């Protein structure tokens, strides 16, 4: 990992101003991503993971502003390049697939015309070449009768097929980075496995870098080399996927793992435990550990000081004041 | 889809039957039609003769069916006042109203769609507010007063346009603006709302995430979705215009069915009133039926839905 | 619940009020509407002259911005020498009375039909849908003209005709709003708890349809006022000596070449009233954040 990373993010902040006041949903997120690497970003909705991605793509909602010490992709400074250059980078450099392929594909346009437009817009050339490319990509993602699909509308396809179309669209212009935002959340469990296998295979064959965002650590564990767990707009734990999933250092990672059936978590057996409470609104005084209200181990120190991102091993860090064996379960909340 | 079309068609048919019955029985509400036909000075024998001639002595339901049957074949009887077949009078007047209605709806769309798109794209800016102001003013100006004001300005002061009659295209300019401007606000608001919804949608986020040019995002991806309900509403508005052009046609002495209807009501010429009522209602029913089908046809999601 | 816990922020009513005052066009609309209403109610006290008193020696006097105007008739006089300002003030009575009474009648009809359709669904809904479709297919203006021609023109007839015809939007909106509310959990819970239909309609549905109802009412009130003016303009509205803005416009038409102000003044009054009503309606829609189902 000596080569310069494909994507480098340093201290990204996103702020949203609206009627209610100021919200600070992303607070100092940093990570590197190398070519051919898969980074899994985990967290509940409201953890700031989606906004981090939207900031990368320049698609923040109205009223949201970002600032970052560094945000470079493939040598380009994303904070400096203009809108036109950013548009050129989309699809050819970074391609994105979204959660719900039903609402994310324009309902009144045919599959073929959606795919061809992306190609024509970035690569130019003839319509015929674009059509050929579309057929090729649909076949590449495992869609049978690809040529016939071009004339169909999104709603005429099943959820799994639509997500494959979305992936084909992402591949149209040979991107270097694929961002997959909850790619399987809206799909049936049986279809999920197929999509994950496809992503895995595409990465091996094409050497894509992938950022896989999901609330489901099980999904992330399937594909990722590294994981970053987000909570309260910050990365609370990051490290090699295998290590983090086997021996989670942060209480939130551990709690997330407990929500997944069949996951073996060190402290207890395979009992499913929901995380109490819900993600707070990121405004007002944000000092101290954001997870403390929902944490079984919270102490007074968690309110008083921001926990630092502490090194566990060379590339493994956790944002907690306590190591797992230093923690005490709060007495009044001990399960009977 | 087929089931929907059939159900929708049956509803349209039922509506038409109801309207025709209402139009027919209106005659009876207004007094003895034989008296009306024969005139004030008629003797008792004259009235009896008229009653016999027009079949007015038969049971009223039987009369309705024979009237409706003739109306279906385009025979609306004879005008009391002009002693001409009503269908002939309609044939000369209807094109005028249709032209006015079509021109007005096109004028309204030509104004409403660009304004609606602008207002949505520049949501909450001065442009948005200006477009909304135009809409609010349009709704508050009574059509006939707007027409009169235009007549004073363009017809009398500036002498640019003729103020009455229907001889040339110039005669249609002011009526078209007056009638069209009134339909603009709803169409504009609907375009704006549709665009706002589209621009917030996931598929527009996709289009932006793929770096498509703004022109394509606005017109190919967003407007296509936003216009689906607008087209349907425009068809319905066109139907309203055919019935709502009475005041405008009267003000500009434009010889369409609106002015004819006003005249007929003044003279108590019931067959003409009935026929116009039926024709306008018929057009409206057919237009709303077509608008619903058009909606379904334009929206691929509805095309294959149940 | 609200009674037990101390209020943390301002109450919802307070917030709504503050938003109303901050909404400039709403405040403008309500103020103009209020002034016009007061003008209508206290017309006998405000009007400088008897609106019916004719004076053939003082015919067609021009308003104040003309050089040969008379100070005692600020807005001039009409073709039989009646004071234009006084007739204008009394005319607000006709417009507002028609607007309010027609909307009360049509609002009642439309709400009953719409709420019934939305609440009971099924056959009731089918019948109401059919009634709405039939009503919409009848060309309103033509039918109104015909009915007035049959029963004679008077204030009562005009109010009745408009009231019996303008219920369609009420029914459409109330139907969809009721449908929405009906599927909410708290209504389902009330039904599961065995509350009667009447009780649910009265306690759960009606309080929630208030805002959309008000918004439709403003739209239809403006509609009724325009229609009355149009009918009167064509001579099928209220009776001749009564000061109605539509009638004034109708009388003014023959003088539009030489005395266009006869046309401009009542038209502007009509325009101001309609604008005030529409601004109020739009403001209500914005402030309450309801009535989004409206076009």
Image (tube, grey):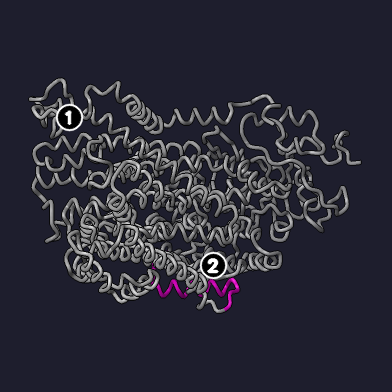
Which residue is pictured at 25% across the width and 54% down the height?
A: B246
Q: Is residue B127 depicted above or below C3 in this figure?
A: below
Q: Which quadrant of the structure image shows residue B283?
A: bottom left
Relative to C52, say whether A74 is above or below: below
Looking at the picture, how far across and down is residue C193, in whole percent? 73, 47
The stretch of residues the image draws in magenta is A123-144
Question: As drawn, is A127 to the left or to the right of B268?
Answer: right
Q: Is residue A7 visible?
A: no
Question: Residue at left 25%, top 31%?
Answer: C88
Dot 2: element: helix
* Residue A94, placed above or below residue A79: below
State the SS at label 1: loop
Magenta stretch holds residue A137: yes
The reply to whether residue B189 is visible in this rendering is: yes
Residue ID at (78%, 55%): A260
User: Position of B23 compared to C249: left or right?
Assistant: right
**x, y percent for residue B44:** 23, 65
Q: Chain of mark 2?
A: A
Location of mark 2 (residue): A155
The percent coordinates of residue A35 (x first, y second) are: 60, 58
Callout 2 crowding tier (Cα within 10 Å): few <14, some 14–19, many ≥20 = many
Percent position of residue C229, x then y: 28, 43
Q: For this rendering, which residue is in front, B79 or B59?
A: B59
- Whether the magenta-drawn stretch holds residue B206 is answered as no
Q: Which of the labelled discs sits on residue C82, or is there none?
A: 1
Q: Are marks 2 and 1 on the same chain?
A: no
> Along the line of sight, which residue is nearer the eye, C141 or A146?
C141
Q: Is residue C267 left or right of residue C214?
A: left
Name the image quarter holding the N terminus of chain C: top right
Chain of residue at mark 1: C
Majority SS type along the magenta span: helix
């Amino acid at each position: 990992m000596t080569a310069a990373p494909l994507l480098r993010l340093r201290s990204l902040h996103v702020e949203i101003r609206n009627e209610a006041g100021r919200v600070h949903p992303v607070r100092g997120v940093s990570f590197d991503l190398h070519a051919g690497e898969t980074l899994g970003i985990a967290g509940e909705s409201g953890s700031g993971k989606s906004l981090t991605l939207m900031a990368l793509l320049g698609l923040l909602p109205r009223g949201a502003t970002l600032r970052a010490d560094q945000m470079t992709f493939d040598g380009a400074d994303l904070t400096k390049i203009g809108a036109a250059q950013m548009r050129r980078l989309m699809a050819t450099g970074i391609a994105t697939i979204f959660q719900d392929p039903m609402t994310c594909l324009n309902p009144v346009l045919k599959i073929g015309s959606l795919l061809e437009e992306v190609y024509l817009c970035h690569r130019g050339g003839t319509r015929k070449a674009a059509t050929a490319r579309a057929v090729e990509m649909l076949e590449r993602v495992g869609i049978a009768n690809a040529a016939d699909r071009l004339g169909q509308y999104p709603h005429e396809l099943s959820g799994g097929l639509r997500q494959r179309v979305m992936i084909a669209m992402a591949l149209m212009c040979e991107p270097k980075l694929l961002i997959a935002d909850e790619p399987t959340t809206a799909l049936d469990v049986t279809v999920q496995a197929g999509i994950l296998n496809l992503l895995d295979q595409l990465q091996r064959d094409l050497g894509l870098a992938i950022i896989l965002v999901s609330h489901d650590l099980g999904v992330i564990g399937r594909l990722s080399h590294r994981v970053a767990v987000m909570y309260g707009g910050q990365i609370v734990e990051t490290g090699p996927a295998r290590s983090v999933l086997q021996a989670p250092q942060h209480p939130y990672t551990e709690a997330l793992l407990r929500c997944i059936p069949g996951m073996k978590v060190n402290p207890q057996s395979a009992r499913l435990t929901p995380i109490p409470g819900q993600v707070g609104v990121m405004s007002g005084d944000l000092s101290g550990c954001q997870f403390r209200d929902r944490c079984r181990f919270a102490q007074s120190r968690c309110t008083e000081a921001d926990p630092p991102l502490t090194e566990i091993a060379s590339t493994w860090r956790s944002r907690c004041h306590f190591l797992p064996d230093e923690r005490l379960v709060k007495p009044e909340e001990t399960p009977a | 889809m087929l089931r929907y079309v059939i159900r929708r068609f049956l509803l349209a048919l039922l509506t038409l039957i109801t309207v025709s019955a209402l139009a027919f029985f209106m005659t009876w509400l207004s007094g003895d039609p034989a008296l009306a036909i024969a005139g004030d000075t008629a003797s008792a024998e004259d009235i009896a003769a008229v009653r016999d001639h027009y079949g007015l002595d038969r049971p009223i339901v039987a009369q309705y069916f024979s009237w409706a049957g003739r109306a279906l074949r385009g025979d609306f009887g004879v005008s009391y006042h002009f002693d001409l077949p009503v269908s002939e009078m309609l044939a000369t007047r209807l094109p005028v109203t249709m032209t006015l209605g079509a021109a007005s709806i096109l004028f309204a769309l030509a104004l409403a769609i660009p304004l609606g798109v602008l207002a949505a794209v520049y949501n909450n800016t001065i442009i948005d507010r200006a477009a909304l102001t135009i809409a609010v003013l349009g709704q508050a100006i009574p059509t006939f007063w707007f027409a009169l004001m235009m007549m004073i300005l363009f017809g009398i002061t500036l002498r640019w346009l003729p103020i009455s009659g229907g001889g040339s295209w110039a005669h249609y300019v002011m009526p078209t603006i007056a009638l069209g401007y009134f339909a603009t606000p709803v169409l504009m608001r609907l375009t704006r709302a549709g665009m706002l919804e589209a621009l917030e949608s996931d598929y527009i986020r996709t289009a932006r995430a793929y770096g498509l040019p703004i022109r394509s995002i606005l017109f190919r991806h967003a407007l296509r979705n936003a216009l689906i309900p607008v087209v349907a509403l425009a068809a319905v508005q066109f139907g309203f215009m055919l019935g709502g052009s009475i005041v405008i046609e009267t003000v500009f002495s434009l010889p369409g069915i609106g002015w004819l209807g006003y005249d007929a009501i003044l003279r108590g010429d019931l067959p003409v009133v009935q026929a116009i009522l039926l024709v306008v209602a018929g057009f409206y029913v057919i237009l709303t039926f077509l608008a619903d089908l058009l909606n379904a046809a334009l929206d691929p999601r509805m095309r294959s839905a149940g | 619940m609200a009674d037990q816990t101390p209020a943390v922020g301002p109450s919802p009513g307070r917030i709504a009020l503050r938003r109303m005052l901050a909404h400039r066009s709403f405040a403008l609309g309500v103020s103009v509407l209020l002034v016009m209403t007061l003008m209508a109610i206290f017309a006998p006290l405000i009007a400088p002259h008897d609106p019916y008193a004719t004076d053939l020696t003082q015919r067609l006097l021009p308003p104040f911005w003309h050089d040969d105007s008379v100070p005692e008739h600020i807005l001039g006089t009409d073709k039989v020498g009646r004071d234009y300002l006084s007739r204008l003030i009394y005319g607000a009575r006709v417009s507002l009375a028609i607007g309010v009474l027609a909307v009360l009648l049509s609002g009642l009809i439309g709400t009953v039909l719409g709420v019934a359709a939305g609440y009971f669904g099924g056959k009731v809904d089918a019948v109401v849908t059919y009634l709405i479709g039939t009503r919409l297919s009848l060309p309103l203006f033509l039918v109104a003209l015909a009915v007035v021609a049959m029963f004679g023109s008077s204030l009562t007839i005009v109010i009745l005709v408009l009231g019996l015809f303008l219920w369609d939007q009420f029914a459409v909106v109330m139907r969809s709003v009721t449908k929405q509310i009906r599927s909410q959990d708290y209504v389902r819970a009330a039904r599961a708890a065995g509350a009667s239909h009447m009780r649910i309609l009265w306690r759960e549905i009606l309080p929630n349809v208030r805002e959309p109802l008000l918004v439709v009412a403003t739209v239809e009130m403006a509609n009724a006022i325009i229609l009355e003016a149009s009918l009167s303009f064509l001579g099928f509205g209220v009776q001749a000596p009564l000061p109605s803005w539509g009638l004034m416009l109708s009388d003014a038409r023959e003088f539009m070449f030489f005395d266009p102000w006869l046309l401009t003044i009542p038209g502007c009054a009509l325009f101001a009233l309609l604008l005030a009503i529409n601004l109020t309606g739009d403001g209500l829609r914005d402030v309450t954040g309801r009535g989004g189902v409206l076009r």
